[in-house]
Amino acid sequence: MTVAVSTRSVRNVGAEALGPAAQKIRNGLISGGTLVVFALIWQWLGVIDAFGHNVLPTFTDTMRALGEVVTTGEFWQNVRHTMVQWAIGLIGAALIAIPVGLFLGRGRLRHRSTRTTIDFLRTIPPVMLLPLFVLVWGTGLQMVVLLAIYAAMWPMLTQTIDGVRQIEQMTLDTAKVFKISRRRTFFKVLLPSVAPFITSGVRVSAVISLFIAIVCELVAGSPGLGQALAEAQHGGDSPLMVALILVTGMLGVLINLVFRFGERTLLAWHPTYAKEA
């Protein structure tokens, strides 16, 4: 026990001695080294054709295809289509989910009467509804946006409801005792308390909205990166197909980083985020 505690203490002292800047450099080197190892393994698997039928192109061939495709106007047009559908779907989901979540979370009866319905609807995979949405709204922008709204609204809705339910009733009762107006209570008590839940829900929904947009393009043939990916697959262009898969992954990572940074910036005053800073 003494040895374990001593070893842990030495590690903690060593981490503190490095300082924040040195820790960031060390983490960056570790991440970079991991990517290099991953690329080498990928290259080796591609050279030996580990999966057969040239399914997995080499890393160098994929990077060459990626370098060629990003110089074309068609690629950036597809990126624009995907990002427009993603943004409209996410904004639409937020405009619906957050107000509804605030409304349902405030009332115990409203919450209990709708909880089962919400749990049922949010467990339905959005992809399973794609044929129905295509049948009703076709394969255009409207279908993609509506399905993205449906898929992206549930994390925000449930997080908002949970955030409202976390507020102690004593806090709200105190505001009533001091005759604080409902508007002031909403902006000074309710909204600041729920804000961390809302932002985390929005961050999760942002990635879901992108995923649904790409799946709609891939399966239904809507314009965007998904449609380009399907065309590369049907044409047997494995390097281009894998390159486009990497692009969609990088978009997801970038969106998550942007929203995480925005979350920490907007909520820097909150004790939870102040501790992380």
Image (spheres, grey):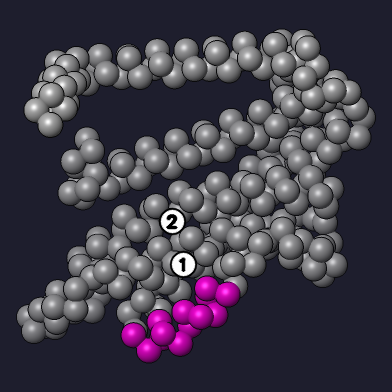
Point 46% across, 61% down: residue: 156
Where is residue 145 drawn, in percent x and y? 67, 58
**In which quadrant of the rendered image does the C terminus lie?**
top left
Which type of secondary structure does the marked residue at label 2 adopt? helix
Q: Which residues are magenta?
A: 108-120
Cα distance between the residues tagged 2 and 1 = 8 Å
176 relative position to 258: left or right: left
Where is residue 94 drawn, in percent x and y? 49, 61
Whether residue 145 can be seen here: yes
Res 201 label = 2
Residue occupied by mark 1: 157
64 magenta-colored: no
- Predominant SS of the magenta segment: helix
Which type of secondary structure does the marked residue at label 1 adopt? helix
- Amino acid marked by disc 1: Leu
The reply to whether discs 2 and 1 touch (Cβ–Cβ < 8 Å) is: yes
| Crowd around label 1: few <14 · some 14–19 · many ≥20 (10 Å) | many
22 relative position to 82: left or right: left
**In which quadrant of the rendered image does the N terminus lie?**
top left
| Above or below, comparing residue 82 to residue 183 in the picture | above
| Crowd around label 2: few <14 · some 14–19 · many ≥20 (10 Å) | many
Point 27% across, 18% down: residue: 23
Point 70% across, 32% down: residue: 245
- Which sits earlier in the primary sequence, circle 2 or circle 1? 1
Where is residue 208 drawn, in percent x and y? 58, 51
- Amino acid marked by disc 2: Gly
| Above or below, comparing residue 89 to residue 58 in the picture | below
Whether residue 73 can be seen here: no
Q: Nearer the viewer, residue 6 or 214?
A: 6
